[in-house]
Image (cartoon, rainbow, N blue to C red):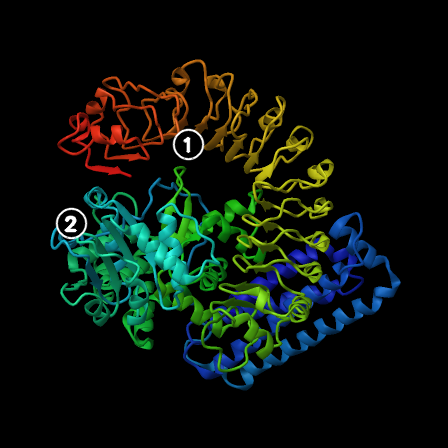
Amino acid sequence: MAGIAVQFVIQRLNDFLAQEAELLLGVDGQIRSLRDKLGWMHALLKDHHGNRRDNDRVKVWVAQIREAAYDAEDVIDSYIFNIQKPGRETSAGFMGSIRSFACCIKDIPAIHKIGKEIGDIERRLNDISSNRSDYGIGNIPGCGEASSSSYQSQTWREKRLPIAEEADVVGVEVETKTLVGRLIEGDARRAVISITGMGGIGKTTLAKKIYNNIHIKKNFDFHAWVSVSQEHRLREIFLSILKSLGQDERETTPEEDLRKQLYESLEGKKYLVVIDDIWTRDAWNGLVSAFPDRQNGSRVLLTTRKEEIAKYADAESTPHKMHFLNESESWALFRKKALPGNVALPCPANLEELGGKIVAKCGGLPLAIAVIGGVLSRKEKSVNEWYKVLTSLEWQLNESEDAISGILALSYHDLPYYLKFCFLYFGAFPEDSEIYVDDLIKLWIAEGFVQQRGEEELEDVAEDYVEELINRSMIQVAQRNLNGTAMKCRIHDLLRDLSIANAKEERFLDVYGKTAPTTPTTPRRLTITASGGLRKFIFSNRSTLHLRSLFPFNERWEEIETPVLKSFFGALKFLRVMDLRRGELTSLPDEIGSLIQLRYLCLMDNRELRMLPSTITRLSNLQTLNIFNTNIKMLPVDIWKMEQLRHLVVKYECQFSNSTAVHRLSNLQTLTNIRAGSWTEDELEKLINLRELLIRGRLNMSSSRPISKLIHLRSLCLLGGSGSFIPPFESLSNHHHLYYMNLSGHFEKLPDLHEFPPNLTQLYLYGSKLEQDPMGTLEKLPNLRILCYAGDVYVTKEINYLFIRECDELEEWRVEEGAMPNLTSLEISSCARLKMLPDGMRHLTTLQELKLKYMTEEFNKRVRENEGEDWFKIQHIPSLIIK
């Protein structure tokens, strides 16, 4: 791990020298020398890779190198802080500040100071180098040999499948069928059915497969999935289930009120609630009173490692114990992961014996097999490479307390250095959380983990990092976009434990939970997972100067005295990332403007926050500003000074105070929920790097003209609202990356076929009130897969998912035989005048799911099972949901 800390600092030194060498007044030579010396140290660390984890002398030596590298990073950041701190800004931004600094004679002492500090670090590195021979480290058997955990850096972009879940499921078909039967059949009482087994055996995978089963969806009125984990909050669990019911409650609502509301909402419904990863009786006791039992066949499905919890939750229900994979099942999963592609092809004969030995070491544990297969998937398909993995695996198993920890450790140590920091970063997120990949990528870039690769945008490189971690089974896909990219991801709790353990050992990250650390620490990143944890940290640990990231989850900021908070902000001069979501903030202190190295600031879900201090525009390095779901309605007048902004997410009421300088934010890639205004005509076309754009409010007739110039767009939303118009589009045929469009407002007519984005996948039209049938155009769009239309309804042949919502004028709908041959999911909701379903529904043989929501009682009577006049039209559909 120290190796990646050193590599990271070397990269920063290279970047620093490339940009500022001519302005360092003589110390550039010292910085180059420091970089080169660290480079030699990094090479030595790679030589000692296989021995440092079990030899005390090597551990001490490695720790010394790591601390020197961290100190070098602090020197760089301190230098940048001094030349950028408030009072040194110039109209030329960051580079202007540096030039002013370099030209000012009064700042020569600061240059001498950085030179002295670099010299001190160099002398320490010389002593550390001497220690290697003085203490016999170079004579330790194996030192000087290359690590067996070799890797090849692979940067190609692989094809991504448009799937919602990974298909790495083997050996659970019988179990799935059995548990689906138990959930659907049996007593009328609310039964609790549990899945038990050790970590990594596939409990959550099986539960997901059951939860998504079409017969389950058909037999229950309501479905919800919640993860509990070891450090849980009942309030958040209740809020999550209520959100599934379509109820968006405030986080400040008292817990007992949420419990009562959930109980009342479930009353009378036949529901299925999956409670994943429950650990204690107390957790179950806190939840069970919110689930009514009305003798209607409702069910709760639990997953837990502890069989006694399963029996405690329902003594009358026998827990389902997960089994280890047998030899053939293990081999099938290994083939999927180690040799992705056509699994029907036989494994190369020269690898089959080695593969069998590797699989045998995993003992039938699915997580272990998937992870070790992921390691091999990135290596050359040769006997030599597979033999190295087998040898390294045997060594890890000998050194570890159990097989799974050894295999996971090998998978971590095999990661290329540019992925190790990225993997360790998952320890910052709460257990069992689903992480938005877009957020993750922004955080990695803000931290400096993502390396420039040719002319590619950093976001694209980071997207490949995510996919490589997925392919290695280090993280899992929770949800994908229809264009194949991962939308959400998660990490198994055993792998999260591994990331936290390694991160703590190396001072990369610390997690401050209900139990405070027993010894003082100076972590470079800090996650707060218990309410009041930040307050305790402020008073018990003053070592905040080293922090690069702060994640105070579950924190109540109003409980921290303002002077203390101001002092705390003032001490965070190196901070790059601050995530204050759901903090119940009412204001931000002006001192936030002193965090001039800040790259990422998230303030979302602070609903009482009404304004940003003017000092925030001093954050000239800020890349991401997220104020979604706050009460901020006006952006600062001088926001244009924040020229490094790449992502700006605001609340839909928010608007620019000074729209004449919006073009200065030329690095923007994300601009969402901003109010329309004169800037859309005058400034929008200059934001040429935009990828995601969401504008709310009435647009002028010429407002859509600039959009034709934004050729990097991936997502476009123009939400004019009731009675507004969508101006005529100029051609979007050059927008090859644009796959999602959401247009709310009246159209004179849709664009012609050749004017649509060629790769459009999802199209949402609301209140269009088109006078002409658009289907002659829409049915010819080659990649359109989802159409949601509110207004006069027409459908296309290639649609997979169709949503018909709030169509107040719709009285009759016709479906001709042969129409929509690929339709798998249909939702009709809030169409008050629609009296019946079309006879042509009988011909939709591919339809797997039909949702009818908020329709009239007369309509619902016609589709009642075995009784309604329209039942014969839909009885072939496996899943029918009526709400």
Nearest the eye: 378 or 732: 732
- Can residue 471 be seen? no
Q: In this rendering, is residue 112 above or below 880?
A: below
Report the residue marked by disc 2. Answer: 184
Question: Mark 1: which secondary structure?
Answer: strand
Quarter of the image with the C terminus in it: top left
User: Which residue is depicted at the point 65% across and 59% down?
Assistant: 588
Type of the residue with mark 2? Ile
| Front: mark 1 or 2 | 2
Which quadrant would residue 780 be assigned to in this image? top left
Q: Earlier in the sequence, mark 1 or mark 2?
A: 2
Residue at image mark 1: 762
Choose between 880 and 571: the one closer to the eye: 880
Q: Position of residue 247 (x, y in %)?
A: 40, 47
| Mark 2 neighbour class, 10 Å CA radius: few under 14, some 14 to 19, many 20 or more | some
Q: Is residue 219 left or right of residue 81?
A: left
Q: Secondary structure at mark 2?
A: helix
